[in-house]
Image (cartoon, rainbow, N blue to C red):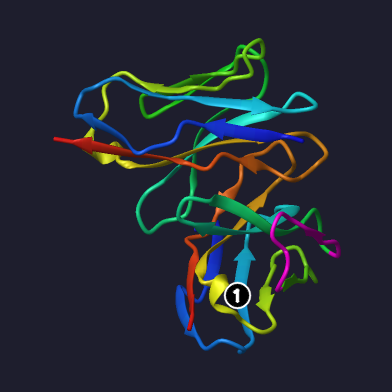
Amino acid sequence: IAGITQAPTSQILAAGRRMTLRCTQDMRHNAMYWYRQDLGLGLRLIHYSNTAGTTGKGEVPDGYSVSRANTDDFPLTLASAVPSQTSVYFCASSEDSNSPLHFGNGTRLTVT
Amino acid sequence: GDSVTQMEGPVTLSEEAFLTINCTYTATGYPSLFWYVQYPGEGLQLLLKATKADDKGSNKGFEATYRKETTSFHLEKGSVQVSDSAVYFCAQSSGGSYIPTFGRGTSLIVHP
C-alpha cells in the first residue's frame, strides 16, 4: 500500500542520547515535512524539504537536523535529546505546494 | 505572514446534530485550502479540499466552501455521527512556498 512509513512507532529515550526518527515514502513526492504535535499547540513544522538535496527550517528547528539524500527518505535526528522534545512526531509528503499532505502514523517520543 | 485560525474546542454535540467548525485564513496569494481529520492514535488524513474561490469541497457528508471575500473555509456537516469524533485541522498551501500552514485543530466529541 502506497504511503508513508515512520519508525519507530514509539520510543523512550534518556536525555542526552542521540536519536534518529525514520521516514520513508513510496509515492515519489517532491516535498517532505517533519511536524511535532503537542497538546494545545497543534502541529508545528520542524524542517522541510522541497526536493531531494535541499532542506529548510520550519517554525521550531532548534535541536533537530534533517537530510534528504534521495526522494524517498527524510530522517529526523535529535543530536542530544532534552525532555522538551517529548512529543508526537509526524512525517508528511506532498506532490507539490498546492497538493494535500500525506501523513505517516507518527512516532511517540518520550525523553526522560 | 500566512496563517490559519480555527475555532477552539472541544465541540461537543449529540448524534445527528448540525456541525460547523469555523476557519479563516490570511494569505498573500491565492492558497489552496484543506480540511484534515485525525482519529485517535493516527496521523492526519485529508478530508476535503478546495483550490479556488467559490469551490466547494465535500467528502463523507462534510462540506466546506472557499469564500475569498470573507477569507473563510468553514467545515459543515448536517448530521454528525459518533464515528465523526476526531480532531479537525484547517490548512492552507500557497504556490511556491512549499510550507503548508495549519490551524491548531478543533476536537469534536459526538455523544450517542
* Residue sitting at x 61%, y 81%: A81
Q: Position of residue B35 (x, y in %)?
A: 51, 34
**Is B83 placed above or below B80 here?**
below
* Residue sitting at x 37%, y 59%: B41
Determine crowd level at label 1: few under 14, some 14-19, many 20+ residues with C-alpha closer than 10 A: many
Q: Which SS class for mark 1?
A: strand
Please report, as a chain letter, where disc 1 is located: A
**Quadrant where the image shows the C terminus of chain B:** top left
**Is A52 placed above or below A22 here?**
above
Q: Is residue A60 magenta?
A: yes
**SS assignment for the magenta stretch, majority:** loop
Query: Which residue was labeled with disc 1?
Result: A21
Q: Is residue B24 left or right of residue A61?
A: left
Instruction: Residue type at mark 1: give it.
Output: Leu
The residue nearer to you, when weighing B75 against A39, is: A39
**Quadrant where the image shows the N terminus of chain B:** top right
**Is B51 placed above or below B38 here?**
above
Q: Which residues are magenta?
A: A53-63
Q: Quadrant of residue B33?
A: top right
Q: Position of residue A67 (x, y in %)?
A: 77, 71
The residue nearer to you, when weighing B27 against A54, is: B27
